[in-house]
């Protein structure tokens, strides 16, 4: 196991912490939008498409009465999706204090600007913490085991160091019951690497996003046995502006296996959309969410640039080794 201890480690730890803080501050500072602001967003259809992908994952794997852990839950944007799946218990953790506050407000039902709705049917515990640093099995000893763990658009923040990537997977493994499911979405490193290879310099993007790698970026590290800490800056209009890290999926899969988590499937978002749009119930869900609009007016559908951003992500499902699913 590569886990260097030495003089330089202290500095590494300090800068790792600084980056984690940068990410937390970025998300904390993002305030809730009004419905009008949200609809005016240049990436509104991308947001809706991502909500559709998360909804499909939840509908595919959640069962009535499940205990759910939402790692990096953000402002609780998935609470309604879990409610529709009739789960029994929810724990959400996020490093950003501001997001957890918004999540709490949303859960409590007051000032939910998106939708006036009845209270959620499941009890919930919402915690602020660094899921890639803290031993969550200690924090959540009384809540575990979970039937399903979800980490949406956030696992890549654990790949700043090997120790954090391992902590993330160790936490999932320790808290998931045997046969339980780990679902998630994160950037597709193969797509990002392909794009940087084709780019003029170390940056690329379109009207709604850009990605810029550091000067010290090397493809060698991506191909090495220790591909952690490959940092880039990600900017997505009206959503993200912070440091992120490449997660080579083949290494992620092998590392997950060390923690008794076996791959069920991995699909790039484009492939995911094509596959699940063959099923009428998910076409109907897409229509309800308004992700692709009605196709009659240009502005009511996903733009080409938003579709390109969707291509930067993948969806994965892992299963904890052990007893099969409950029937
Ligand atoms: N999962 C939510 C969703 O799908 O709407 C939020 C996704 S947002 C793109 C990424 C989230 O990861 C942010 O809320 C951020 O605060 C959280 N995050 C980043 N690093 C984290 C860490 N070390 N521990 C817990 N949460 C973290």
Image (spheres, rainbow, N blue to C red):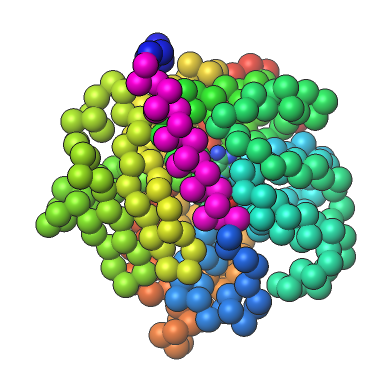
Q: Position of residue 188 (x, y in %)?
A: 36, 45
Task: Give the farthest residue toward the left.
Answer: 200
- Magenta-span inclusion, residue 11: yes
Q: Is residue 304 above or below residue 313?
A: below
Residue 241 drawn above or below residue 174: below
| Left-right relation of 136 to 25 | right
Q: Which residue is drawn at the image coordinates 84% and 67% (left, top)?
A: 110
Q: Position of residue 27 (x, y in %)?
A: 56, 55
Left or right of 67, for residue 225:
left
Q: Give the x, y percent position of residue 138.
A: 72, 22
278, 54: nearer the viewer: 54
Q: Which contiguous range is marked in magenta?
A: 7-28
- Residue 175, by quadrant, is top right
Using the rendered image of the protein, determine whether residue 192 is visible from the camera's viewpoint.
yes
- 17 drawn magenta: yes
Q: Quadrant of residue 209?
A: bottom left
The N terminus, quarter of image = top left
Residue 145 seen in the current view: no
Viewport quadrant of the C terminus:
top right
Q: Main secondary structure of the magenta part?
A: helix
Q: How many marks?
A: 0
- Asked whether 233 or 64 is in front, the reply is 233
Residue 36, above or below 117? below
């Amino acid at each position: 196991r590569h886990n260097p201890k030495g003089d330089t480690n202290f500095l590494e730890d300090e800068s790792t912490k600084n980056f984690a803080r940068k990410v937390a501050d970025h998300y904390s500072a993002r305030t809730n939008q009004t419905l009008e602001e949200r609809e005016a967003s240049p990436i509104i259809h991308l947001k809706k498409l991502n909500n559709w992908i998360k909804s499909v994952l939840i509908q595919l794997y959640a069962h009535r009465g499940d205990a759910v852990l939402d790692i990096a839950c953000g402002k609780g944007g998935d609470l309604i999706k879990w409610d529709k799946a009739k789960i029994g218990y929810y724990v959400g953790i996020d490093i950003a204090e501001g997001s957890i506050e918004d999540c709490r407000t949303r859960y409590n039902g007051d000032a939910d600007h998106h939708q006036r709705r009845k209270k959620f049917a499941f009890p919930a515990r919402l915690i602020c913490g660094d899921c890639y640093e803290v031993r969550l099995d200690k924090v959540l000893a009384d809540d575990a085991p979970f039937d399903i763990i979800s980490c949406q658009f956030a696992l890549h923040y654990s790949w700043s160091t090997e120790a954090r990537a391992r902590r993330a997977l160790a936490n999932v493994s320790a808290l998931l019951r045997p046969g339980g499911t780990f679902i998630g979405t994160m950037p597709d490193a193969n797509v990002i690497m392909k794009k940087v290879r084709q780019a003029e310099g170390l940056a690329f993007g379109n009207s709604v996003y850009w990605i810029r790698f550091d000067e010290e970026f090397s493809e060698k590290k991506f191909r090495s046995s220790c591909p952690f800490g490959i940092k880039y800056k990600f900017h997505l209009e009206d959503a993200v502006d912070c440091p992120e890290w490449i997660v080579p999926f083949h290494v992620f899969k092998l590392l997950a296996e060390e923690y008794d988590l076996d791959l069920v499937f991995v699909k790039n978002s484009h492939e995911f959309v094509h596959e699940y749009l063959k099923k009428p119930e998910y076409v109907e869900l897409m229509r309800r969410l308004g992700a692709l609009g009605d196709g009659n007016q240009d502005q009511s559908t996903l733009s080409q640039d938003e579709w390109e951003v969707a291509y930067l992500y993948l969806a994965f499902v892992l299963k904890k080794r052990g007893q099969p699913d409950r029937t």
